[in-house]
Image: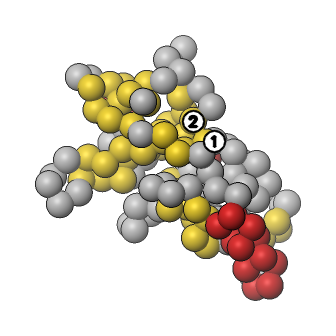
């Protein structure tokens, strides 16, 4: 069973997300210095509580929810794009999407610092 506060770096290639206890730990890929940029945010989507450790990281480095594709800025925990659907429906919901995004920009995910330490990515 994985440690609650770390993930083996080998399990976190660029643009992947894994679970560490209550946290979704991910890798945004290399920054300007060539080093991988790791992050950790609380695991439950602000929309309908999907497990964000099962999400993906898009080309902009945002964490994308696996259920309705809400997007999060992992540096702040803010929802920057609202869901595309709700419950089992997946599709356009313009007004609803904007309302949830507004709420998600206020009720942000919690953020922790995640750094490479030896062979692991450790939450601080
Ligand atoms: S549960 Fe995450 S976008 Fe719906």
- Is 23 situated above or below 61? above
Residue of label 1: 43
Rendered residue at 40%/61% (across/down): 61
On the image, which quarter does residue 100 sit in? bottom right
On the image, which quarter does residue 38 sit in? top left
Check residue 23 in the rendering and tell me which mark sits there, or answer none. Answer: 2
How far apart are the two marked residues, 2 and 1, measured between alpha carbons? 5 Å
On the image, which quarter does residue 54 sit in? top right
Where is residue 108 shown, x and y percent of the image?
Answer: 64, 56
Viewer-proximal residue among 69 and 124: 124
Pick whichever of labels 2 and 1 is earlier in the sequence. 2
Question: Is the residue marked 1 within 8 Å of ligand 1, measured from its CB?
Answer: no
Where is residue 62 shown, x and y percent of the image?
Answer: 47, 62
Question: Is the residue marked 2 within 8 Å of ligand 1, measured from its CB?
Answer: no
Where is residue 44 shown, x and y percent of the image?
Answer: 69, 45
Rendered-image quadrant of the C terminus:
top left
Q: How is the image coloured?
A: secondary structure
Mark 1 crowdedness (10 Å alpha carbons): few <14, some 14-19, many ≥20: many
- Element on which disc 2 rests: strand
**Can residue 77 be seen from the camera position used here?**
yes
Rendered-image quadrant of the N terminus:
top right
In the image, farthest residue toward the left:
33
């Amino acid at each position: 069973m994985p440690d609650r506060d770390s993930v083996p770096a080998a399990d976190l290639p660029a643009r992947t997300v894994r679970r560490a206890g209550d946290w979704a730990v991910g890798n945004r890929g290399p920054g300007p210095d060539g080093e991988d940029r790791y992050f950790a945010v609380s695991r439950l989507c602000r929309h309908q509580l999907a497990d964000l450790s099962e999400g993906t990281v898009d080309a902009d480095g945002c964490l994308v929810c696996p259920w309705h594709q809400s997007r999060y800025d992992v540096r702040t925990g803010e929802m920057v794009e609202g869901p595309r659907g709700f419950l089992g429906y997946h599709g356009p919901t313009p007004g609803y999407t904007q309302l949830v995004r507004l709420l998600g920009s206020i009720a942000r995910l919690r953020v922790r610092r995640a750094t490479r330490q030896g062979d692991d990515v450790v939450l601080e």
